[in-house]
Amino acid sequence: MNKILFILLILFASISKYATAQGEDDIKYTNGKYEGPYVDGKKEGMGKAVYNDGSSYVGAWKNDRRNGVGRAIFKDGSSYYGDWKNDMRCGTGTYEFRNGDQYTGQFENNQIHGQGTYRYANGNKYIGEINHGAITGKGMFYYTGGDRYDGLVQNGQKNGKGKYFFANGNIYEGSFVADKKDGPAKMIFANGDVYVGDFSNNHRTGKGTFTWANGNLFEGGFVNGLMNGQGTFTWANGDRYVGTWDNNIRDGKGKLVTKGGEEMAEIYDNGVKQ
């Protein structure tokens, strides 16, 4: 009796091993349904899984896990196509977000990580470094209006040293803080004007030198892009005015110094010489 039972067990084991290694099964399990091959009772090869939460995966399996190239659609409507390793997005691939954004590039342990291209639903685009899911590192932004930025980025914002190219031909090179021009910088205008100095909250604020294309020059204080406080305005012919300014207008005491060295004290009230 024991001998007969033993023979039956051996025969059953042989048949089961052949079926799981060679055949394709349609098997329901606790969290969904899988269609594809098994090896030694584990999902292996090209197969499809549809999960109870509405998500799905079609692609390569190994040792019961997603391994190789495959496409997953997640329960929120987002999707990923690319490399998998031990059930995690790892390697290169494309992730399409529910809001219309799209990323193509490197992944590590299920996170966007490495070099890649992030396309926003509004048409803007970022190419560069991404650190554990955050757009942080060095990269380039391309904007729909024609502007572009090349420099340091933190959490999706321009932060640190960078260069911004405006569609109108202006160029800003310097510091950014939280997406705004802030700190020492140089601004070159398409018409030939140049500013070198401080910026704050996107405006020329602090000390700086503005040189016009016609040769005129101002060196002194700025507030919100306008000459304010003490400063010296030098005309292209060599004459200069040293005094105080209020929103680009001479205001208060000052002196005019000609190119020949003559000095004349002057007083202005809201731009009007007294």
Image (tube, helix red, strand yellow):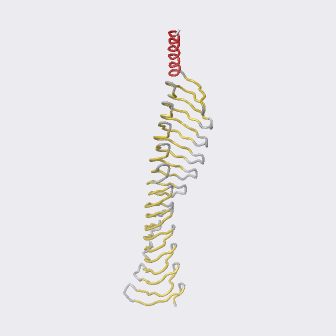
Q: Which of 154 and 1 is in front in this view?
A: 1
Instruction: Spot the residue most to the left.
Output: 260
Q: Which of 118 and 110 is in front in this view?
A: 110
Q: Nearer the viewer, residue 26 or 196?
A: 26
Q: In this view, does 66 lie above or below 105?
A: above
Q: Give the tally of numbered discs.
A: 0
Locate residue 93, reporting x and y percent.
49, 41
Instruction: Please tell me which residue is depicted at 50% across the width and 14% down the height of the picture.
Output: 10
Locate residue 179, reporting x and y percent.
51, 61
Locate residue 43, reporting x and y percent.
52, 28
Locate residue 191, reporting x and y percent.
47, 68
Instruction: Spot the residue most to the front.
Output: 2
Horizontal side of residue 210 vs 122, given as left or right? left
Q: Nearer the viewer, residue 202 or 261?
A: 202
Instruction: Please tell me which residue is depicted at 44% across the width and 90% down the height of the picture.
Output: 265
